[in-house]
Image: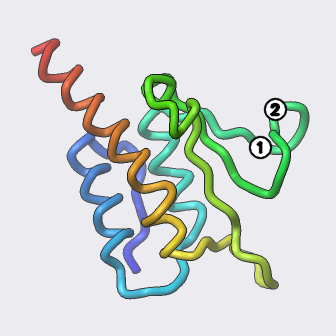
Amino acid sequence: MKKVGSNLSINELEEAIDNLCMENVQEIDFNDIKRICEQLGCTYYDRGKDRGRGAAERFSHPVLDDFPEYNGFVAIHLKHGGGSTRKVYKRNFVKYMAPGLKIIVKRLKADKDKSE
């Protein structure tokens, strides 16, 4: 599986999301998802007072405030188990997180087109 790089354009980020969704694997490296989210401008809610209840890793973005089903956040659960790398199930990413990330990409592309 190809790693997600840094400093990607909006189109490259959209392609990276699509590639993760179409990848022929059962698990995805959480760091790839985190890299995509950070490049889209999402805020990662890590440990401490910012972390909500539950075991989900959450990312917020102002674009998602307009969508009640997301309530400003996209979230994913880490796969439980051993190992030094954090993994998520691909099926969970495709079902729960990718649609929210695609909304962010679509809005960012529309804003970019308006400014040009």
For the point 38% across and 69% down, which residue is it? 20
For the point 60% across and 41% down, which residue is it? 59
Q: What's the amino acid at mark 2?
A: Asp
Name the residue tied to disc 1. 46
Name the residue tied to disc 2. 50
Q: Residues within 10 Å of mark 2 (few under 14, many from 20)?
A: few
Whole-percent x, y for residue 51 in the image: 81, 39
Horizontal side of 49 relative to 28 (left or right) equals right
Whole-percent x, y for residue 33 in the image: 51, 57
Q: Are marks 2 and 1 in contact (CB under 8 Å)?
A: yes
Horizontal side of 75 relative to 18 (left or right) equals right
**Nearer-the-camera pick, 20 or 68:** 68
Q: Marks 2/1: CA distance? A: 7 Å
Q: What's the amino acid at mark 1?
A: Asp
The C terminus sits in image quarter: top left
The N terminus sits in image quarter: bottom left
Q: How is the image coloured?
A: rainbow
Query: Tag 2, which secondary structure?
Result: loop
In the image as oriented, which residue stretches furthest toward the right?
Answer: 48
Whole-percent x, y for residue 115 in the image: 16, 12
Q: Which mark is residue 19?
A: none
Q: Residues within 10 Å of mark 1 (few under 14, many from 20)?
A: few
For the point 52% across and 74% down, which residue is it? 28
Horizontal side of 65 relative to 75 (left or right) equals left
Q: Report the number of numbered marks.
A: 2
Query: Tag 1, which secondary structure?
Result: loop
